[in-house]
Amino acid sequence: RKTSLTGIKPTGEPHLGNLIGAIEPAIEMAAGEYESLYFIADYHALTTARDPEQLAHWTRSVAATWLAAGLDPQRTVFYRQSDVPETFELTWVLSCITGKGLMNRAHAYKAARDANVAAGEDPDAGVNMGLYNYPILMAVDILIMEAHAVPVGRDQAQHVEIAADIAGSFNHLYGSRYRFVVPEAVIPPETTGHTLPGLDGRKMSKSYDNYIPLFLPAPKLRKLVRRIPTDSTPVEAPKDPDSSAVFQILAQFAPDDVVADTRTRLEAGGVGWGDLKNQLADVLEERLAPMRERYEALMEPGSELDDALAKGGEIARERAGRVLRSVRHAVGIA
Ligand code: TYM
């Protein structure tokens, strides 16, 4: 049976992009034929998180989001990355067979470097070793659980390719003693743009601070939706749905027939951006309200969330331990 695995970094409130790009596709896979392991990547968050209480809060909040969105902890091994310390031992082993050049090419590090260069600063200013090694830690998350399929948004595809490269290097060196499963990213098919756009039209991201959180009270949600930029095409003029961030978000959340109808009406003219924003706010509220209620109950201290994570952590740890023992043997330690 094939295994699907994915993680979310608790560096902010979960947003619409996380739900569409990772959470919902992953839950769908878990309901189908896949064995599934989903986790909260709390140690990954430490590359940027500096406020301990915030980190603890967001870790809980991401966990509550998974459960509110429908993850069934009886079916899915659901855990915190930090409950699997075997991860760090394997991170060292794999660091020793990973070329530095591969890390130099990783997007997140390259983007930080390019921004520094553009600003005339030291290329590595503000870059910590955690950010640099990030893809190795992520490869370990995947490889230590012997996952085949990794449901992620497009922005994480390169990281999964790096994990596959690292697995390949290991298998090449030690394959007669132990072989890692070579993972593949599973990226949701997107009908409109590449990734869900945010409040400024760029990719919705915690790092750009342009995201729409999942669990806002209705009036705040509406206010945020109003902030999505639009051009100044007059109400009566025909509009291009595909170049509109409002439409792209709507397309991911509204039923297909509503999306098709909205497209026709925009192209015909007579619908203003303000109307479209109101429609989007209604669509989001309808989809998110029941989830918000479950989320709030799960965030209460002593909710079933704690128990679910504790049980999942144990199972995950045991599984990682088995793989780690094989790796130790393969490389000649233990
Ligand atoms: P993170 O926490 O940035 O994002 C979590 C998931 O949400 C997806 N996503 C999006 N999808 C569509 N549109 C968007 N605007 C959008 N924004 C985010 C991301 O692609 C991701 O799937 N490094 C990972 C966490 C991680 C991980 C792993 C994932 C750590 N170890 C092992 C898979 C396997 C990250 O920072 O995701």
Image (cartoon, rainbow, N blue to C red):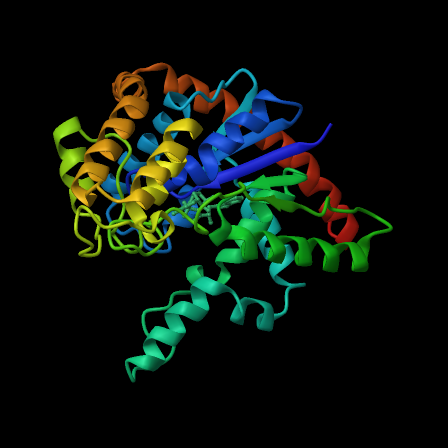
Q: Is residue 101 left or right of residue 227?
A: right
Residue 159 location in percent, x, y?
55, 55
Query: Is 101 or 82 nearer to us in this picture?
Result: 101
Residue 208 location in percent, x, y?
28, 56
Residue 123 location in percent, x, y?
38, 79
Query: Is 233 or 175 nearer to us in this picture?
Result: 233
Quadrant where the N terminus sits is top right
Q: Is residue 16 visible?
A: no
Where residue 247 sits, quadrant-wise, is top left
Residue under the image location 50 percent in, 61 percent down: 133
Query: Is 98 or 242 nearer to us in this picture?
Result: 242
Q: Is residue 213 left or right of residue 306?
A: left
Where residue 98 sits, quadrant-wise, is bottom right
Q: Residue furthest right?
A: 176
Residue under the image location 47 percent in, 53 percent down: 155
Tell how many labels: 0
Residue under the image location 38 percent in, 20 percent down: 305
